[in-house]
Amino acid sequence: MDYAILDFVQEHVRSPALDAAMLFATHLGDIALVWLAASAALIVQPKRRAWGIAMLVAVAVTAAVGMLVLKPLFGRVRPFEALEFSGLLIPAPSGSSFPSNHSMVSFAAATVVCCLPKDGPGVRIAKALAVLIAALIALSRIYLYVHYPSDILAGAILGVCFGLLSVGLVKRLWPKAFLQS
């Protein structure tokens, strides 16, 4: 199934316009820059500081577990290597394929945003935007042929779990901060 989806995308979806969009999306996830910026934007707001810290924890822990534990544990060869695909649009990533760290980190951060208390239309927009960005980053990894769809799905599920755990941890360690939000 993984190969069928990858091949379908390459044969029927890939286009110059989407190439540019997917390159942009994947670069948003590089070194979690978009999520670090989002956590900083939350941290500078006293009312949302705890949420920003929860996002920072989610991003850091998820990235570390993915790169230092899960990827070495599973050691899955990336699809472009397994299939000797020569049409990469980005430099060949190193490390193994499973799970997708871009997806894990993005969905961990988006989950923290989705846990923000309802506080008007701005928060609803932020939640939708966070999920949209996480999904685009994740899908870009399939489009660019550097991850299997199952890497993305596992990364998204693990990311949601890490996001929820991070919110729970920060709430437990700093409960008064969440009462203010």
Image (cartoon, rainbow, N blue to C red):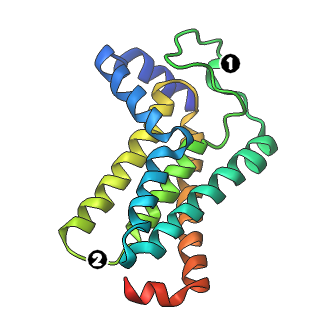
Q: Amino acid at mark 1?
A: Glu
Q: Residue furthest left?
A: 121
- Counting from the top left corner in percent of width and height, residue 104 is at 57, 50
Seen from the viewer's position, the closer of residues 18 and 126 is 126
Q: Is residue 36 left or right of residue 25?
A: right
Query: Mark 2 Cα within 10 Å, few/some/many (few <14, many 20+)?
Result: few
State whether residue 105 is above or below residue 115: above
Where on the picture, by quarter, is residue 31? top right
If you read the primary sequence from the N terminus, does the residue marked by circle 1 or circle 2 appear first?
1
Where on the picture, by quarter, is residue 42? bottom left
- Counting from the top left corner in percent of width and height, residue 163 is at 54, 65
Q: Is residue 51 left or right of residue 31?
A: left
Where on the picture, by quarter, is residue 57? bottom right
Q: Which residue is mark 1?
A: 81
Q: Is residue 78 left or right of residue 141?
A: right
Identify the residue shown where x is 42% and y is 48%: 134
Q: Secondary structure at mark 2?
A: loop
Q: State how far apart marks 1 and 2 are (Cα).
A: 45 Å
Identify the residue shown where x is 52% and y is 61%: 160
